Image (spheres, rainbow, N blue to C red):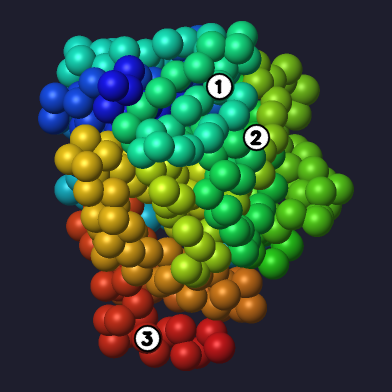
């Protein structure tokens, strides 16, 4: 008799979504999280419509702001602004509060969350998964879900391959009342000087999250881009509350999602949107799919569900990234047009997916124009 029906390694949005779904279906569910909530995570913290839809039935989203105005520049030039007149584009959250709310929901559903507990190894045999902890304790489960990130032990165990690796750098800056008023309800996106790069400013009450992302291998130029961006905004000299970086890794097409009774979800599976590098909606959705499949004892269903619901969006995002990387100035111009803005607006709100968008006639024509 195994101790648990489902054991989950990692207590971020993917792992906690898996735990909520698994426990809600009556499975004995354990989460192993190496840190202690609430804990900081490098993340822009912008929830698109798909992220909100995935969690709004289980938590009251701890919003710091709701974005209605979007400003765009191309390496600091050609600025334009668009306003969402009906519904917000994004809901801004701080990851410590957001993730902790997900933890509470998972526990209320019946999951056991063990914090400050690091998993060191995963083995399979005899129809069960054995997880060895840092202190030598061993956990057994009928099925396990890896949600410990792209550099964790479960991605290596499953053999996930990553075809796109990007470096994200971010500072969180405390701001005074005047700047809070200046940035309330407003975001800025700058299409950057490196191929496929961009920068952002996201307001979160008394904090501004300012970051850049670009392909790995351009570390010094990426750092220089962030410095120049902060200076351009007149924010230099503010001591950051957090100054961090991380790698985002996007899976190669056909990369495995399962090995035996071990599934991987979220970042561990390399599930994120390649153009924007948005990952929270992929974490919450893939985690819920994994938790349901593991609780029901139908692990093959998880692979089918991910391939049907998430992979098409990733393929479309890869097409958009390729076009943007080749012709960022033209991409900026197209986004300025009514069809381009509607595409961006509807994606942010969760009213459409990228795979549906890129097949629309104006977008197909624009992608051909972009090469």
Vertical arrangement, residue 78 with respect to residue 203, above or below: below
Please name whichever residue, 206 or 22, is drawn nearer the observer in this view of the structure.
22
Res 5 label? none
Residue 245, picture quadrant: top right
Badge 3: residue crowd in 10 Å (few <14, some 14–19, many ≥20): few
Q: Which residue is mark 2?
A: 170
Residue 193 located left or right of residue 369 = right
Q: Identify the residue at the far front of this view.
A: 126
Q: CA distance from mark 3 to mark 2?
A: 33 Å
The residue that label 1 is drawn on is 132
- Relative horizontal placement of residue 196, taking residue 308 as reference (left or right): right
- Of the pair 152 and 132, the residue shown nearer to us: 132
- State whether residue 303 appears in this view: yes
Q: Quadrant of residue 208?
A: top right
Task: Identify the residue shown where x is 43% and y is 33%.
Answer: 129
Residue labelled with disc 3: 364
Q: What residue appears at the point 37 percent right and 13 percent down from the top-left corner?
A: 113
């Amino acid at each position: 008799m195994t101790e648990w029906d489902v054991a989950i390694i990692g207590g971020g949005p993917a792992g906690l979504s898996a735990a909520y779904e698994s426990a809600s279906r009556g499975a004995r569910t354990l989460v192993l999280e190496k840190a202690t909530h609430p804990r900081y995570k490098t993340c822009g913290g912008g929830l698109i419509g798909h992220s909100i839809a995935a969690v709004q039935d289980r938590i009251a989203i701890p919003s710091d702001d709701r974005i209605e105005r979007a400003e765009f520049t191309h390496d600091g030039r050609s600025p334009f602004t668009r306003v969402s007149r009906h519904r917000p584009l994004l809901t801004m959250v701080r990851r410590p509060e957001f993730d902790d709310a997900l933890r509470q929901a998972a526990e209320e559903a019946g999951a056991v969350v063990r914090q400050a507990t690091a998993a060191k190894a995963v083995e399979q045999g005899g129809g069960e998964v054995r997880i060895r902890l840092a202190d030598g304790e061993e956990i057994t489960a009928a099925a396990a879900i890896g949600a410990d990130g792209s550099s964790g032990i479960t991605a290596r165990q499953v053999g996930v391959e990553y075809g796109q690796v990007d470096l994200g750098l971010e500072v969180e800056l405390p701001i005074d009342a005047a700047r809070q008023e200046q940035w309330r309800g407003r975001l800025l996106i700058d299409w950057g000087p490196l191929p496929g790069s961009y920068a952002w400013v996201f307001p979160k009450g008394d904090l501004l999250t300012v970051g850049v992302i670009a392909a790995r291998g351009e570390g010094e130029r990426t750092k220089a881009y962030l410095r120049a961006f902060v200076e351009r905004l007149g924010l230099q000299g503010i001591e950051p509350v957090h100054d961090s970086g991380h790698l985002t890794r996007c899976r190669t097409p056909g990369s495995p999602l399962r090995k035996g009774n071990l599934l991987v979800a979220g970042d561990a599976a390399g599930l994120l949107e390649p153009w924007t590098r948005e990952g929270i909606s992929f974490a919450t959705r893939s985690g819920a799919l994994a938790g349901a499949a593991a609780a029901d004892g139908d692990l093959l269903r998880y692979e089918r569900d991910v391939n049907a619901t998430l992979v098409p969006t990733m393929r479309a995002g890869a097409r958009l990234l390729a076009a943007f990387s080749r012709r960022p100035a033209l991409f900026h111009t197209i986004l300025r047009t009514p069809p381009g803005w509607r595409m961006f607006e509807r994606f942010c709100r969760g009213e459409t997916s990228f795979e549906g968008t890129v097949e629309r006639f104006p977008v197909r024509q624009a992608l051909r124009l972009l090469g």
